Image (cartoon, grey):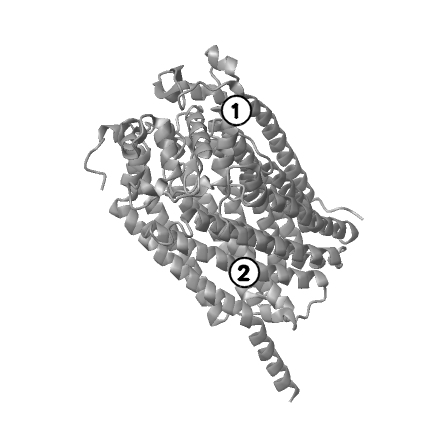
């Protein structure tokens, strides 16, 4: 039987093979990129922090340091800046203690379902503010929330708020009481402080710059 | 549809099982809409059910019911088409039926725990027993393991039946696609303290499901539907299917990069994510063109008097056409709106994402799965030619008005949030609430609730139609048979 010559563009075999090759190539590329990314997003160590080695995700002991979020001329956006040491809940945490605290904080974050109201690193629900840089939010650092909760430090104010959120309402939309214990609250604050030190390529942009400008202004109805 | 429990005329047990999956799917679809209404109300009246049934709980059940009803309807669709494509009964049908009841029991327990226990202490036990607290895949670990077992049984059924029966192109694509779909779920089953690592793998499940494997799945369903409903030529449909696979996986797999802009991952994902996710709408255009082309061609043949090509199931065909358009509009256009990093730095984590999510899940998935349910009903009553009823049309009109209305409302809310909270004020607590309390946002949220109610009304018509369309048609056919005999 003579085979009729048909165009390759209408050949199922051609498209099947092409689909397999394209998919295979994409998968191989993704795996290669994944190996590279995993290396870059693995948590740094306490030594990295002590030696000033910058890691995209710093060690849990970053909670022992001052954290800022400042414009980087070279990269063209804001980056976390890890500064001098500061006490966290009145003490310096060892590497093991900090790792255990962060683990407890992350577990609590999942157990309390934070992500179905808030966003973390911009992912989650849109019913409450993004928590990526919550530790650095002017609301905690300008005396507002420390005043409302009657605490001296940011970490203590945050922990107090997390334990009794609906006792400190700032808007009609409030955070509900989730039964967060003192230990869980401290761990959650550590989790938030650690997250604020993650290099998010400049997200959120111009974090709270104008809000700082409008501080105590007329918008807060 | 529920009425078809006793009066089904299926040749194959596999197709009876498909109807069971569809029944649970439609119940969960209803649950999803109800939870959405509660959450939408809370945006306007924050004291509604405060500290009783909080937004976080309503929203968790809302999105979980969504994912699970779609998975149910997807499994149902596969059991429906499996004997048609392979020409034989599903190999392990007894095991398949057992798996259905196990899965349904597990889903019931998970939902009851979500609703009544809600949250637990910050410990491993909570993640194993109550919820995992990771958006979309909140199911506790015990349920994860159960899901894996049930999916393995399902996959065994598909694979073994494929190996034993006829190997069509549609089945080949499905067997490969379902393998990837099931395997990806494993990426979401571990705990880490590192939130960036957590979200890196979390996206492997979410993105590689909804923007790669689920899309290919939809392509396969559309191919099957076009053959069944229009009598489209298999060679052409399957050739298109392979082209769609090529383009969907070619763009969708590395399109994953658009979720890696801001979660701690390196900058090179900006370029990779931008390029490949910008290509993601291309296959959706192709799918749209393909469905309309086949529809027009076969309809044309029928009207020209070349017999046998007319639409055999007009409700299913309508939903497949809506799928082609909705997929392109919701996933393609609304996705592309905010996929470039230059835009996404402002839109990431705003109502813009919610607008896209609503239209994309409905347009790309809900539509075609509803179409598959109509195909199931047609088979259950052995109806030669199924026509739309008044209820079918009401369901279509109201569901589409509702989803488009919600999407437009949320897009407006998103614009406002992006401009005020992000671009002007730079995010943060005060910036967030200033934007949330502006009249533009409140109006948009009000319209979202109204449109949600419209959608719910459409859902009631849909359920009523699925319940009755088969029986009504059956009687009509019997009468016409009786009349002809007399």
Q: Residue A194 vs residue B424: left or right?
A: right
- In the image as oriented, which residue stretches furthest toward the top? A51
Reading the image, the residue beneath label 2 is B26
Tell me the element at label 2.
helix
Of the two numbered discs 1 and 2 in the rendering, the one whose residue sits closer to the viewer: 1
Q: Position of residue A105 (x, y in %)?
A: 48, 32
* Mark 1 and mark 2 residues within 8 Å of each other at the beta carbon: no
Q: Quadrant of the N terminus of chain B?
A: bottom right
Residue A25 appears in the figure: yes
Q: Position of residue A175 (x, y in %)?
A: 37, 43
Q: Position of residue B173 (x, y in %)?
A: 66, 46
Spatial separation of the CA atoms under disc 1 and disc 2: 45 Å
Which class describes the residues within 10 Å of circle 2: few (<14), some (14-19), or many (20+)? many
Could you say which is closer to the camera, residue B327 or residue A149? A149
Instruction: Check the residue under mark 2 and report the chain it is in.
Output: B
Residue B222 appears in the figure: no
Query: What label sits on residue A99 in the rendered view?
Result: 1
Q: Quadrant of the C terminus of chain B?
A: bottom right
At horizontal 50% and vertical 14% (from top left) the residue drawn is A48
- In the image as oriented, which residue stretches furthest toward the left? A218
- In the image as oriented, which residue stretches furthest toward the bottom? B486
At horizontal 40% and vertical 44% (from top left) the residue drawn is A177
């Amino acid at each position: 039987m003579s085979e009729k010559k048909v165009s390759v563009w209408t050949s199922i075999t051609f498209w099947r093979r092409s689909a397999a090759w394209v998919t295979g190539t994409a998968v191989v590329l993704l795996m290669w990129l994944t190996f590279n990314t995993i290396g870059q997003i693995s948590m740094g160590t306490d030594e990295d922090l002590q030696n000033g080695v910058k890691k995209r995700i710093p060690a849990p002991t970053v909670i022992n340091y001052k954290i800022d979020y400042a414009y980087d001329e070279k990269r063209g956006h804001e980056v976390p800046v890890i500064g001098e040491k500061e006490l966290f809940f009145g003490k310096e945490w060892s590497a093991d203690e900090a790792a255990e605290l962060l683990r407890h904080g992350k577990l609590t974050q999942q157990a309390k379902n934070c992500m179905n109201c808030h966003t973390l690193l911009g992912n989650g629900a849109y019913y409450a503010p993004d928590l990526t840089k919550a530790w650095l939010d002017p609301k905690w650092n300008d005396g507002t929330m420390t005043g409302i909760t009657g605490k001296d430090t940011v970490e203590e104010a945050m922990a107090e708020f997390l334990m009794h959120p609906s006792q400190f309402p700032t808007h009609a939309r409030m955070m509900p009481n989730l039964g967060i214990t003192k230990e869980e609250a401290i761990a959650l604050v550590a989790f938030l402080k650690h997250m604020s030190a993650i290099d998010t390529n400049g997200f959120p942009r111009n974090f709270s710059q104008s809000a700082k400008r409008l501080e105590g202004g007329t918008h807060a109805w | 549809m529920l009425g078809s429990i006793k009066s089904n005329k299926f040749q194959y047990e596999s197709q009876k099982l498909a109807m069971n999956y569809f029944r649970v799917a439609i119940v969960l679809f209803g649950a999803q809409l109800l939870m959405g209404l509660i959450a939408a109300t809370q945006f306007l009246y924050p004291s509604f059910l405060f500290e009783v049934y909080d937004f976080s709980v309503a929203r968790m059940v809302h999105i979980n019911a969504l994912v699970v009803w779609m998975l149910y309807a997807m499994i149902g669709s596969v059991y429906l088409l499996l004997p048609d494509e392979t020409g034989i009964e599903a190999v392990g049908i007894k095991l398949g039926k057992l798996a259905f009841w196990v899965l349904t029991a597990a889903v019931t327990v998970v939902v009851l725990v979500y609703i009544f226990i809600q949250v637990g202490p910050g410990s491993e036990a909570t993640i194993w027993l109550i919820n995992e607290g990771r958006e979309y895949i909140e199911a506790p670990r015990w349920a994860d393991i159960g899901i894996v077992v049930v999916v393995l049984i399902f996959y065994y059924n598909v694979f073994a039946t494929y190996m034993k029966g006829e190997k069509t192109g549609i089945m080949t694509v499905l067997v490969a696609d379902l393998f990837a779909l099931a395997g990806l779920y494993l990426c979401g089953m571990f705990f880490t303290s590192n939130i960036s690592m957590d979200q890196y793998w979390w996206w492997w499940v979410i993105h590689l499901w909804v923007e790669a494997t689920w899309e290919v799945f939809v392509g396969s369903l559309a191919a099957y539907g076009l053959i069944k409903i229009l009598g489209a030529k298999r060679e052409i449909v399957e050739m298109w299917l392979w082209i769609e696979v090529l383009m969907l996986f070619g763009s969708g797999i590395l399109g994953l990069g658009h979720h890696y802009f801001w979660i701690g991952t390196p900058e090179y994902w900006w370029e990779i994510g931008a390029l490949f996710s910008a290509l993601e709408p291309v296959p959706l255009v192709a799918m749209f063109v393909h469905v309309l082309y086949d529809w027009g061609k076969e309809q044309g043949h029928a009207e020209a008097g070349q017999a046998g090509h007319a639409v055999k199931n007009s409700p299913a065909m309508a939903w497949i056409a809506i799928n082609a358009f909705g997929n392109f509009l919701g996933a393609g256009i609304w996705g592309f709106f905010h996929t470039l990093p230059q835009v996404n730095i402002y839109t990431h984590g705003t109502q813009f994402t919610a607008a896209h999510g609503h239209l994309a899940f409905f347009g790309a998935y809900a539509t075609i799965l509803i179409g598959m349910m109509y195909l199931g009903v047609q088979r259950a009553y052995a109806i030669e030619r199924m026509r739309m009823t008044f209820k079918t049309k009401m369901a279509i009109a109201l569901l589409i008005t509702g989803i488009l209305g919600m999407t437009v409302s949320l897009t407006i809310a998103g614009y406002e949030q992006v401009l005020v909270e992000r671009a002007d004020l730079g995010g943060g607590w005060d910036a967030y609430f200033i934007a949330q309390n502006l009249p533009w946002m409140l109006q948009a949220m009000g319209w979202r609730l109204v449109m949600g109610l419209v959608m719910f009304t459409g859902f009631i018509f849909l359920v009523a139609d699925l319940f009755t369309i088969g029986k009504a048609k059956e009687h009509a056919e019997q009468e016409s048979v009786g009349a002809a005999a007399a």
